[in-house]
Image: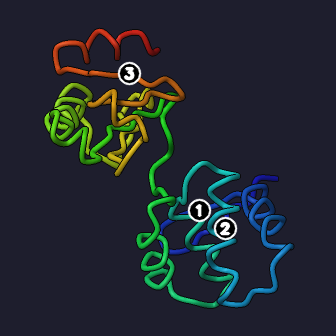
Amino acid sequence: MNTEITRAGSSLNQEEHQSFHDLFEAYNGHEGDLVPLLQKTQEKYGYLSQEAINEISRFLKISENQIFGVATFYSQFRFNAPGRHSIKVCLGTACHVRGGQVLGEAVGRELDVLPGETTDDKRFDFQRVACLGCCALAPVIQIDSDIHSRMSVIRLKGILEKYE
């Protein structure tokens, strides 16, 4: 039997609800559990969905607004499902001086996505990061674990086509 549990415009089936319950077993339900619980939830599901925020809110007895306030403070948390490939555009000083901002804008145009979002086909998620630690190779982008150095807008499309 696939019973639905409906809350605040979202629904979870029994199996999904049990999955959250299992995740929460290691915690006492105190407000101080919030960040570790957010980390475990994202580790398990890849991101923090609205359903996850709802369940955490109920478990810790704190508002969803409070959870979003904490989660948006830390850059480690994401609110969109990750793509099959993750693109990070470096905006550190060396990359910025050598065109990192323009490169980031080109990624957004090419994929029709904003930073922090995932493409509609779930192929890529796009993030801008403060530094990838490859300053001598600037500007750089990282796709999955691959670093692409001395990047240009002209080379970008060809590199993106290699990732399906």
Instruction: Name the residue that disc number 1 marks.
Output: 11
Frontmost of labels 2 and 3 is 3
Q: Are marks 2 and 1 in contact (CB under 8 Å)?
A: yes
Tell which circle, 2 or 3, labels the residue nearer the N-terminal end: 2
34 lies left or right of 158: right
In-image side of 98 versus 35 (left or right): left
Q: Amino acid at mark 2?
A: Ile
Where residue 80 appears, as percent x and y from the top left, is 45, 50
> In the image shown, does 131 or 5 lie closer to the viewer?
131
Residue pictured at 74% horizontal, 65% vertical: 20
What secondary structure is found at the residue carrying circle 2? strand
Q: Measuring 53% from the left and 59% from the top, which residue is drawn there?
A: 49
Which amino acid, mark 3? His
Q: Which residue is mark 3?
A: 148
Mark 2, residues whose alpha carbon is within 10 Å: few (<14), some, or many (≥20)?
Answer: few
Q: Of all residues shown, which one is farthest toward the front? A: 136
Percent coordinates x, y for residue 43 in the rendering: 67, 53
Say what amino acid the circle numbered 1 marks: Ser
Q: Determine the secondary structure under disc 3.
A: strand
Q: Residue 145 at x, y = what percent?
A: 54, 28
Q: Residue at x 59, y 62 (%)?
A: 11
